[in-house]
Amino acid sequence: MDYQKILEEIAEEVKPLLHKGKVADYIPALSEVDPEHFAFSITLSDGTQYHVGDSQTLFSIQSISKVFTFILSLKAYGTHMYDRIGVEPSGNPFNSLVQLEYEHGKPRNPFINAGAVNVTDALVSHYGSCEITISEVLRFIRSIADDESIDFSDRVAASEMEHGFRNMALANLMKSFNNFDNCVEEVVKTYFKHCAIEMNTDMLSRAMLFLSNYGKDPINGKTYITPQQVKRVNAVMLTCGHYDASGDFAFHVGLPGKSGVGGGIVAVIPDVMGIAVWSPGLNAQGNSLVGTKALELFTTKTGLSIF
Amino acid sequence: MDYQKILEEIAEEVKPLLHKGKVADYIPALSEVDPEHFAFSITLSDGTQYHVGDSQTLFSIQSISKVFTFILSLKAYGTHMYDRIGVEPSGNPFNSLVQLEYEHGKPRNPFINAGAVNVTDALVSHYGSCEITISEVLRFIRSIADDESIDFSDRVAASEMEHGFRNMALANLMKSFNNFDNCVEEVVKTYFKHCAIEMNTDMLSRAMLFLSNYGKDPINGKTYITPQQVKRVNAVMLTCGHYDASGDFAFHVGLPGKSGVGGGIVAVIPDVMGIAVWSPGLNAQGNSLVGTKALELFTTKTGLSIF
Amino acid sequence: MDYQKILEEIAEEVKPLLHKGKVADYIPALSEVDPEHFAFSITLSDGTQYHVGDSQTLFSIQSISKVFTFILSLKAYGTHMYDRIGVEPSGNPFNSLVQLEYEHGKPRNPFINAGAVNVTDALVSHYGSCEITISEVLRFIRSIADDESIDFSDRVAASEMEHGFRNMALANLMKSFNNFDNCVEEVVKTYFKHCAIEMNTDMLSRAMLFLSNYGKDPINGKTYITPQQVKRVNAVMLTCGHYDASGDFAFHVGLPGKSGVGGGIVAVIPDVMGIAVWSPGLNAQGNSLVGTKALELFTTKTGLSIF
Amino acid sequence: MDYQKILEEIAEEVKPLLHKGKVADYIPALSEVDPEHFAFSITLSDGTQYHVGDSQTLFSIQSISKVFTFILSLKAYGTHMYDRIGVEPSGNPFNSLVQLEYEHGKPRNPFINAGAVNVTDALVSHYGSCEITISEVLRFIRSIADDESIDFSDRVAASEMEHGFRNMALANLMKSFNNFDNCVEEVVKTYFKHCAIEMNTDMLSRAMLFLSNYGKDPINGKTYITPQQVKRVNAVMLTCGHYDASGDFAFHVGLPGKSGVGGGIVAVIPDVMGIAVWSPGLNAQGNSLVGTKALELFTTKTGLSIF
């Protein structure tokens, strides 16, 4: 298949949509991003990479980091992790407290905010401190992306913290149900740090490769997680990866994926490739408007959905 | 792959679990079923069929019928169908009114009760009467299962209707929001009729074949729906096919599937096969306990998940 | 106190507000009413009556009838009635299904729709038929209002039934929880009949007299309910009489009262008087905008709140 | 009326119930209290006081303090206070986040936890610091109770803070909706301090006197709030004073009142008296079981309900 041609077609077709989305504006660091950006990268199992657009431009990966912390928590705790968090779609906005209260402080899944903050708390317990946690998260991401330059933005993390009252509410609510181990404020800060990690689509598509290959990176040969765990991470991405538009994403794109409010989306085609797309304008559900459309075009043009 | 051997291994391994589930007991017709039943059938694209257990014994397909009516509604209305129903997981029990009220009478997806009753209402509008609707549903199922003997049980349908007050409530609520066309009572009766259709796992695995083959039945050569529509039906089965255990099913089994309270589950492996399993004992979420476990064993043993 | 002067002052002061409310428009029979109407009647314990405005004009009492049916159910069942319905404010709109589902089909109180339909169902069980029920309700109201001409409007009742799907939903939901005895449709019809009873403010203020006098009508000398029951009916009117604006009504008016969507409000000053006010324009919570204001002015001018 | 005899009868009649309630056990300081305690005090408008039981024993007033802080906030902000909090019953448990989220961070009323924390925040803004706030609260209570010895327990306040994660969650959630001015942690600490104020029933019945007398203390002659404000405070106590058992309290007791988890309840009979009762065992809704019963007996025996 001529992937390069397909990517270029897509870049052309989505152009008229680049102004339709709305860049996240709850913190200055995100609202300043130019909505015209577009990037689409794929990395095949043999390491071949195709890309179009601003695939070298770093952006805030935000909730995409939840995939990586969830994987680290599975490595640390195995199936015991599911005592703390579920794997069901929530059917509610990403930051809702309602369900968390009805369900006694156990978050529905690792990709809603409550779940991801809980995962960070579990990692802090495992690694022993917030400092070690954030450096282990970085170490893992640098390894799977094969890029030692990756880091988080202090400015974005600090800015998030200034507006992080709802995440503080979620964490306090979990703590009131005894489903939270450490200092709420410190864990939420650590959570915002890994959300503030900056990558580009080339790095991200490369980083997803082990998830398309049963947990083993086909290039560096390292095994990160078991095939069983990969199957489960991909299943959770498919059912819960896009907040309350997860069904819509499965329906239109048909791939396991995870979006971030910075406009990035990662996805996986098992046995074939890792994918990353970026466009900062968001749709009403908080997912990249153009990114979602571009992925739908990609699966339609290539016929490469999992269904 | 030696499918027959795998099916027999599974039948052996699940035996100790056959008493763990709880047969549906809200109507006599279902509660009388022997919980010891177990059947597992697969039909490959070339028509080869493997089965183990009571694969010739008819059972009430119940909510599995929702897959077939949803498909008929897509054939009748195309994407206009999504004006009436959504495609998001609900995160709530299958028969909840809460979400339906908050979302102004538009059901989350076609597989929760409200959605399926709405689909039946749409079919009644399309076909012009309840009588024609139920015969068209039967005609379609007989065609995809290649079995003219398939019919519904009058006794089960009548018994359901006697206890169908919650479905009447759901339908009246949708009608109060102007998202329902016809007489509530007549449509609910029709809905219970298609839920009372009786099939066995051989028939059901055969009937799923076109969903594993881009909408075209590889045996009789008929094209039922487009590849695009297949992708979407399968996506909705994956994200919404098992009520509020849909995430769990994706997580453990990793296949698009749909369960019924009669203990049946159908599933699809794209490009490979249609699957049906049956065991009447249900788990806490109302899905076949042994059926779910058998499917998990099947994807583990064959490595044939979609992820 | 010069009640007549106070009523006339109030009539003058509320005039500029008569266009601010919105007449109920969900059925033609209600939407046709002239929003300019205003009436305020009080009946003292010695039978003296003061009134201002259209106090002879009949209007649809709607939910005010719930006070009378609740009283009849207390006479029939005593405290056993509280096995079927609660006495707590709902904190939700009058016709919400959410709470009813969470609380397993037991309505919060007799004045939300679910509770009132449940009360009607209890009366039908007690009297043996819908026909006897509606005639007993009329007989009771004619007695307390001392007016044999009172009747319901067939046209309004029929029109309500055509748009009564939400009440059908509520009743079916209660029936699914085994908290409903009779045919849903027949009971809902009977409910709409007593809602369609037509009275004027003179009649209504007279009818409330026994509730200001420990259950005994001070004029005809009949004892309708016990002092204990009066205390409780008045308490439920205070906490639940105005849907999710009940707190606001207690806060501003400070009297036990009950409103109807036809624009009427009844209220009671223990030991002193029965009150009825009417103005068809409603506020955002579905209570008479001018009626509420007029009552607030009345308690402010007379100093006669219960607090 | 022979109040002393009535109080003694009540003390006798409730004895068998003293073990039925459950002492609050979420913090040690409260769980250690002897469940056998019982006290009932009334203070008439002329200052005459009647009491029975342990009316000199101090206990933690807990949520009763919310009445006093609400009054201070009305003095500080007048009706502007209702921009921040409502006056409707919540229909939900006292510490629920669900409603607060649906209603965008505006608490239903000043007596649920979110509302009371919000009131404390408003007072901190008004007085300029947490320190001044707590001393002003104490100054006010000492004045209305005519007792300079009243203080809060450091130990109880500190212990509450250790388990105060849910209140931290509520405050953070309000802050995320911009309905909270100051540092969450400092305000919650101040809130716990005023909840930890210790009084006995003699003090509390004395302190309620101005609320039974149009805002003017009939003994010291001081006017604390306007008659209008008294009417409204009493209305909110009646509709919201006992969490989701407020309707039940109005129904059985028929008086404006406010309970605390320490087992105290205060109530008011307009024009007649202030009331306080104490018994540490709580019913399922978190209100004093014996206290509620004793008040019901009191209004039944004296005929002194407001209805």
Image (cartoon, coloured by chain):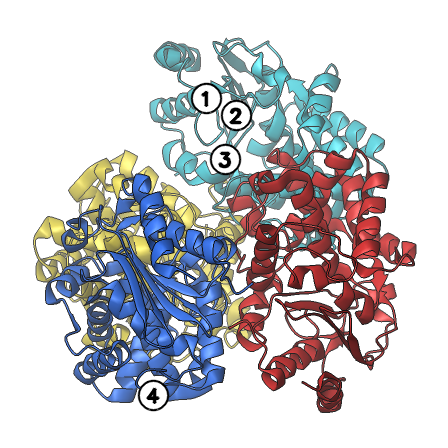
Chain colours: A yellow, B cyan, C red, D blue
Residue visible at 63% across and 43% down in the picture: B114
In the rendered image, which quarter contains the C terminus of chain B? top left
Question: Which is nearer the eye, A253 or D35?
Answer: D35
Chain letter of mark 3 equals B
Say which label, 3 or 2, has the lower sequence index: 3
A152 or D89, which lies in front?
D89
Specify the amino acid type for callout 4.
Gly
How packed is label 2: few (under 14 Cα within 10 Å), some, or many (20 or more)? many
Q: CA distance from mark 3 to mark 1?
A: 12 Å
Q: Which amino acid does the dot numbered 2 rest on?
A: Ile
* Residue type (three-letter) at the residue carrying disc 1: Gly
* Chain at tag 1: B
Distance CA(mark 2)–CA(mark 1): 7 Å
Q: Considering the image in quadrants, where does the N terminus of chain B appear?
A: top left
- Residue at mark 4: D221
Q: Residues within 10 Å of mark 4 (few under 14, many from 20)?
A: few
Q: SS for tag 2?
A: strand
Q: Quadrant of residue B121?
A: top right
Q: Are marks 4 and 2 in contact (CB under 8 Å)?
A: no
